[in-house]
Amino acid sequence: MELFVIRHGEVDLNAKHLLNGRNDSSLTEKGINQARSASETIKELPIDVILCSPLKRTIQTCEIINKNNIQVIYDDRVLERNTNSVMYRPDSSINLIEFYSPNNDIIYHDCEGFKSILKRASDFIEDIKQKYKDKSVLVVSHLDFCKAMYCCLKNEYDINKIISFNQDNCEICKYIL
C-alpha cells in the first residue's frame, strides 16, 4: 500500500508564525499557488482515494489538487490539533518540548497534547491499512497530524526528531505500508 500525505497550503496564520488550530482559515494567494503546484505532481500519482480533514484550508487544498476527480472522504481523525486557548499565540511562545512530548494528552490546561494526536494517527493508520490494503491513499491534513503520521510510520518518538521533522505547506510525503 502506498500512502501519500500532504499538508494544506499556506494560511495567514502560517505566514504570521501564529499557532493555528481547528478554525476555518482560508488559503492565502501563496497557499493557492502551492496547491496548484502540488496538483501537477499529484495528478501523476496512482491515487485511489483521498482522505481529507474537514477544515476549510484542507478542503480548499484538496479541491485544487484533485485534478483527477478522485473520491474524497472527509475524516475528523486527520483534523489539526485542538489548540483551544493557545490558538493565535506566536509560535515562539510555546515550549516545543512540552508541545511535542509524546507523553502528554493535554498541555497548557486545554490544548490537545501530542500523545493524543499520536493515538489518533496510530488508529487511523491501522484502519486504512485494513480498508485500503491494495490501494494508494492520499491524506490531506495539517502539520501536527503529519508529524504524528511520520512518528507512527517510522516508529520515531525521540523528542528532538519530532521537533525537527517539518512538512512544509503542500509538501508531499510518501510512505510504503
Image (cartoon, rainbow, N blue to C red):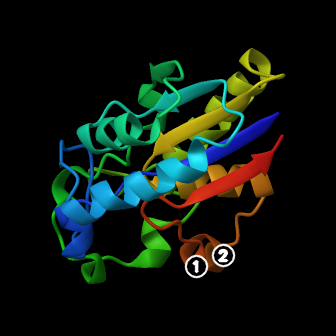
- Please indicate, yes or no, whether residue 103 appears anywhere in the rendered image: no
The quarter in which the N terminus is drawn is: top right
Where disc 1 sits, the SS reads: helix
In the foreground, 76 or 62 = 62
Q: Which mark is residue 164?
A: 1
Measure the C-alpha gap from mark 2 to mark 1: 5 Å
Q: Nearer the viewer, residue 6 or 88?
A: 6
Which residue is more in the foreground, 35 or 3?
35
Which type of secondary structure does the marked residue at label 2 adopt?
Answer: helix
Horizontal side of 59 relative to 27 (left or right) equals: right
Q: In the image, what residue type sits under mark 1?
A: Ser
Q: Residue at x 29, y 36 (%)?
A: 55
Q: Residue at x 26, y 65 (%)?
A: 30
Query: Is 164 placed above or below 136 here?
Result: below
- Badge 1, how many Cα within 10 Å: few under 14, some, many 20+? few
Q: Amino acid at mark 2?
A: Lys
For residue 94, which numbered disc appears in the image?
none
Q: How many residues crowd around disc 2 within 10 Å: few (fewer than 14), some, or many (20 or more)?
A: few
Q: Quadrant of residue 124?
A: top right
The image quadrant that residue 11 belongs to is bottom left
| Residue 90 spot, x, y in % from top left | 20, 76
